[in-house]
Image (spheres, grey):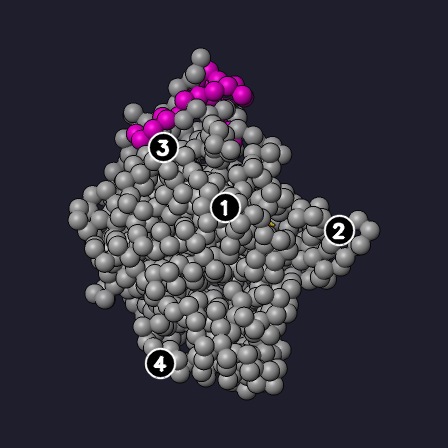
């Protein structure tokens, strides 16, 4: 279904996708005069198949609101902003960037962000600026949550971009550890999937969560553990499985190395002591260990409840061991690896000296990304080698990264801060230049969160609306900037000519031959391939899809690597023309397309180690396990509560919606607290409390919730924005968090383990 025009009322029907979480469900929309009139699920979307949640219906609040940016802005000496032309903005920024690069070198520049929950197309262009600045420093939100997980994958499977996935829909015994898919999604069509599991007496759902989350309410077994104790609990479960000989020896012998060492380590785990540390019923733990190990199809799904808390990386190792030692890997209904059509991650093994570290923390990248937690120090404390210029794109660090005071101070000290966004954000308000982008519904876009196996898909979205004001796409912004910096020429006469000669018969292959030849002769231009192809082949694509042209070489590469999987998905041609067919389908399939169909047994070929075997023994993790034993209990005398600083609820969606009117409930983003704790503090629903951490304080509104553990409180993520420059609405959480309260290894912040105290406001 595409573009059906109702001429009378000027209402159009069209399709697109939701941009609010990593599921990126397909949407069928009705549009009138640059407004969404109606939003439903798109039945034609190959993965979501009509499913959406309540958040997507409100996307009009993303597309049209009072904080939308319409013109490039330059900050004046008095802090106000003046509209300037794109020419002036890009010329001035280019001159400043060149000065900083040529005076201080590659360590003086960092890029932050590059893509949010649905907009990854622009990232291909923004990352080019790193090469132009001779910098490695790419900071991104993934490195404040998922890099511990990626690091473990690197050791287990051979590369940090061997990314795991969960076949929850087909599993019969599912462990949800530190995740609440009912609200946060992250698994296909979450609420339907949960409902099916719940209804089926032959399937078991276990939730590990200190809170009775919406998912826990649907579970067969809820382990309401003490926050931050998952490493103890998972270690105990693995130990029980091994002690009781419930591990899958045949799988282990056939597909892994290192089990003997793992076995010794876990046989030494003091099971009862660890279970009591997590404060759950011992019998239930044995039941889960046995149930999971004996299941036909056991599957583990985790998220921030494991990553934003104590032992981040170790947690990642343990949850993976759970499914690996029980042989729940490489089949239907268990955990698997998957392909990436657009590679979101890379492999930067820190043992190899070629990956440049940061100047102050000597921090290494994981999967190519540096952790936002260290950026303020790298700006403020690295002396002559400090970061002096930062480009922020599709991210709002002043709201979303730990330690807002440190971020504010460091960003205020920069010689150049440029923000590329669709809205006037808190971070933008500190920038020297603000560059306004087309919204995600005004340009070609896609998500790189295609994390499915064995069937994977891709959805290239076309523009729905005409662009707002004097805005540009990221493709155009960064390409012009590279031209202004003179790192790429403004014209590529030969390539443009070859591109124009292409016909359906030649399938753009003449262009690809010329393009490869051109890059072979001009190696310095290889990092800017996306902009070059945008300016040349891009001009010949239908419907002004120039910005998507770089998907063509990716399609050729994907087809060459996964030829059989593409054929199974219905694409035709030889090893080369198959990629052309894929690209054509991507361009024309408005609801998205299946790009590959693997067999489950192909999973072994996705392991990066040449012998396709998994390395179960990770020495660093054995050290972390040994440290667990001696871990002291935290002294809670000054800060008696543990705050979850960032719960996913019905009406939060990162910092994507700024207008508070989008929320149907929970306008204050209230503090959830156990009724007995509230009674001690002498507060009832609607009262106000001061929530005080080592780093700062916030005023919060009380909501009693008997599903909370005593001593544990929760505030939502995605509030606290200053809409139209006014007061913060709801908790501005990262005023409470600090960047040194983090896992020392990956620097992932412990946002779900913030010690606080509460005081009644009278
Ligand atoms: N509605 C909504 N959905 C979203 C988003 C959003 O902003 N709003 N954001 C998206 C993004 S960016 C992400 S990364 C995902 C995150 O998705 P999730 O991680 O699933 O969501 P959270 O609510 O942050 O945390 C999940 C659960 O962890 C529990 N938890 C806290 N501490 C612990 C602990 O020590 N152990 C265990 N086992 N559990 C613990 C919390 O009680 C909570 O129920 O959500 C995505 N989806
Ligand atoms: N305390 C606390 N902090 C957290 C979390 C938490 O649970 N607790 N969660 C963390 C997690 S898991 C994540 S993923 C991060 C998310 O934090 P960020 O990475 O900062 O991402 P978003 O909040 O999604 O912000 C996206 C920005 O992109 C802009 N934008 C939208 N569309 C476009 C576009 O087309 N082009 C451009 N250039 N910009 C666009 C939006 O206006 C917004 O300013 O927050 C983290 N911060
Ligand atoms: S928020 Fe996530 S689950 Fe809900 S409609 Fe959007 S993409 Fe789908
Ligand atoms: Mo996230």
Residue located beneath label 2 in the image: 11
Residue density around tag 4, few if under 14, some if 14–19, many if 20 or more, within 10 Å: few
Residue mark closest to the camera, 3 vs 4 = 3
Q: Nearer the viewer, residue 73 or 410?
A: 73
Residue 161 painted magenta: no
Residue 98 lies in quadrant:
bottom left
Q: Is residue 228 in sight in this rendering?
A: no
Do tag 3 and tag 2 residues touch (Cβ < 8 Å)?
A: no
Secondary structure of residue under mark 3: loop
Residue 685 painted magenta: yes
**Location of residue 195 with respect to 458 vertically, above or below:** above
**Location of residue 520 with respect to 206 vertically, above or below:** below
**Location of residue 716 with respect to 473 vertically, above or below:** above
The numbered disc on residue 169 is none
Residue located beneath label 3 in the image: 78
| Rendered location of residue 511, percent (x, y) | 49, 81
Cα distance in 3D space between marks 1 and 3: 19 Å
At 48% from the left and 68% from the top, the residue drawn is: 534
Question: Quick one: label 2 or label 4, which is nearer the N terminus?
Answer: 2
Q: Is residue 710 in sight in this rendering?
A: yes
The residue sitting at the right extreme is 8
The numbered disc on residue 520 is 4
Question: Quick one: label 1 or label 2, which is nearer the N terminus?
Answer: 2
Question: Quick one: label 1 or label 3, which is nearer the N terminus?
Answer: 1
Do tag 1 and tag 2 residues touch (Cβ < 8 Å)?
A: no
Count how many numbered circles sit on residues in the image.
4
The numbered disc on residue 71 is 1
Q: Which residues are magenta?
A: 669-697
Horizontal arrangement in the rendering, residue 624 relative to residue 21 (left or right): left
At 47% from the left and 71% from the top, the residue drawn is: 533
Q: Nearer the viewer, residue 328 or 597?
A: 597
Cα distance in 3D space between marks 3 and 4: 49 Å
């Amino acid at each position: 279904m595409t573009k059906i025009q109702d001429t009378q009322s000027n209402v159009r029907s069209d399709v697109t996708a939701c941009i609010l979480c990593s599921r990126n469900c397909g949407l069928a929309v009705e549009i009138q005069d640059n407004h969404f009139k109606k939003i439903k699920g798109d039945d034609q979307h190959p993965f979501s198949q009509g499913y959406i949640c309540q958040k997507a219906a409100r996307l009009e609040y993303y597309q049209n609101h009072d904080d939308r940016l319409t013109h490039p802005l330059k900050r004046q000496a008095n802090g106000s902003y003046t509209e300037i032309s794109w020419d002036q903005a890009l010329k001035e920024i280019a001159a400043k960037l060149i000065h900083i690069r040529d005076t201080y070198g590659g360590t003086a520049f960092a890029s932050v962000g590059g893509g949010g929950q649905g907009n990854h197309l622009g990232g291909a262009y923004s990352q080019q600026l790193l090469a132009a600045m001779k910098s490695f420093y790419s900071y991104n939100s993934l490195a404040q949550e998922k890099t511990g997980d990626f690091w473990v994958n690197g050791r287990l499977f051979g590369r940090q971009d061997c990314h795991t996935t969960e076949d929850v829909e087909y599993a019969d015994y599912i462990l949800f550890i530190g995740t609440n898919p009912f609200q946060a999604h992250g698994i296909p069509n979450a609420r339907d999937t949960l409902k099916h599991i719940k209804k089926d007496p032959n399937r078991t759902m276990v939730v590990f969560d200190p809170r009775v989350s919406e998912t826990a309410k649907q579970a067969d077994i809820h382990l309401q553990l003490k926050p931050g104790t998952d490493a103890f609990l998972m270690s105990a479960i693995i130990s029980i499985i091994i002690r009781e000989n419930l591990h899958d020896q045949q799988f282990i012998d056939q597909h892994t190395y290192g089990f003997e060492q793992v076995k010794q380590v876990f046989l030494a785990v003091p099971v009862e002591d660890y279970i009591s540390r997590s404060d759950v019923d011992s019998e239930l733990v044995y039941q889960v260990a046995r149930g999971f190990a004996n299941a036909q199809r056991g599957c583990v799904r985790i998220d921030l409840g494991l990553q934003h808390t104590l032992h981040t990386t170790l947690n990642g190792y343990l949850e993976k061991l759970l499914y690996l030692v029980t042989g729940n890997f490489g089949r239907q209904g268990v955990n698997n690896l998957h392909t990436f059509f657009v590679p979101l991650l890379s492999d930067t093994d820190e043992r190899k000296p070629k990956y440049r570290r940061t100047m102050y923390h000597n921090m290494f990248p994981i999967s190519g990304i540096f952790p936002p937690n260290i950026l303020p120090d790298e700006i403020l404390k690295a002396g002559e080698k400090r970061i002096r210029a930062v480009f922020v794109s599709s991210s709002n660090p002043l709201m979303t990264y730990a330690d807002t005071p440190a971020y504010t101070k460091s960003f205020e000290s920069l010689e150049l801060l440029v923000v590329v966004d669709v809205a006037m954000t808190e971070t933008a308000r500190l920038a020297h230049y603000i560059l306004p982008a087309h919204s995600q519904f005004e340009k070609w876009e896609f998500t790189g969160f295609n994390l499915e196996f064995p069937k994977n898909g891709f959805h290239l979205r076309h523009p729905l609306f005409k662009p707002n004001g004097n805005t540009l796409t990221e493709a155009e912004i960064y390409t012009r900037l590279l031209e202004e910096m003179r790192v790429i020429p403004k014209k590529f006469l030969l390539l443009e000519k070859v591109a124009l000669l292409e016909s359906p018969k030649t399938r753009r292959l003449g262009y690809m031959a010329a393009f490869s030849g051109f890059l072979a002769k001009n190696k310095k231009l290889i990092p800017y391939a996306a902009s070059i192809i945008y300016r040349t082949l891009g001009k010949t694509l239908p419907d002004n899809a120039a910005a998507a042209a770089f998907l063509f070489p990716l399609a050729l590469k994907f087809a060459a690597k996964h030829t059989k999987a593409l054929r199974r998905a219905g694409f035709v041609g030889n090893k080369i023309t198959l990629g052309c067919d894929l690209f054509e389908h991507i361009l024309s399939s408005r609801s998205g397309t299946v790009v590959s169909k693997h067999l489950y047994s192909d999973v072994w070929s996705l392991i990066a180690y040449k012998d396709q075997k998994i390395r179960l023994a990770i020495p660093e993790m054995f050290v972390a396990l040994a440290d667990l034993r001696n871990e002291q209990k935290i002294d809670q005398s000054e800060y008696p509560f543990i705050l979850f600083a960032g719960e996913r609820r019905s009406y939060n969606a990162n910092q994507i919606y700024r207008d508070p009117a989008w929320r149907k409930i929970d306008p204050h983003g209230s503090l959830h607290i156990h009724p007995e704790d509230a009674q001690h503090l002498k507060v009832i629903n609607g009262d106000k409390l001061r929530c005080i951490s080592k780093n700062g304080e916030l005023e919060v509104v009380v909501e009693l919730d008997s599903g909370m553990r005593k001593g544990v409180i929760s505030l939502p993520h995605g509030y606290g924005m200053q809409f139209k420059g006014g007061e913060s609405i709801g908790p501005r959480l990262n005023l409470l968090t600090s960047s040194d309260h983090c896992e020392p290894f990956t620097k992932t912040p412990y946002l779900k383990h913030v010690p606080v105290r509460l005081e009644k406001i009278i």
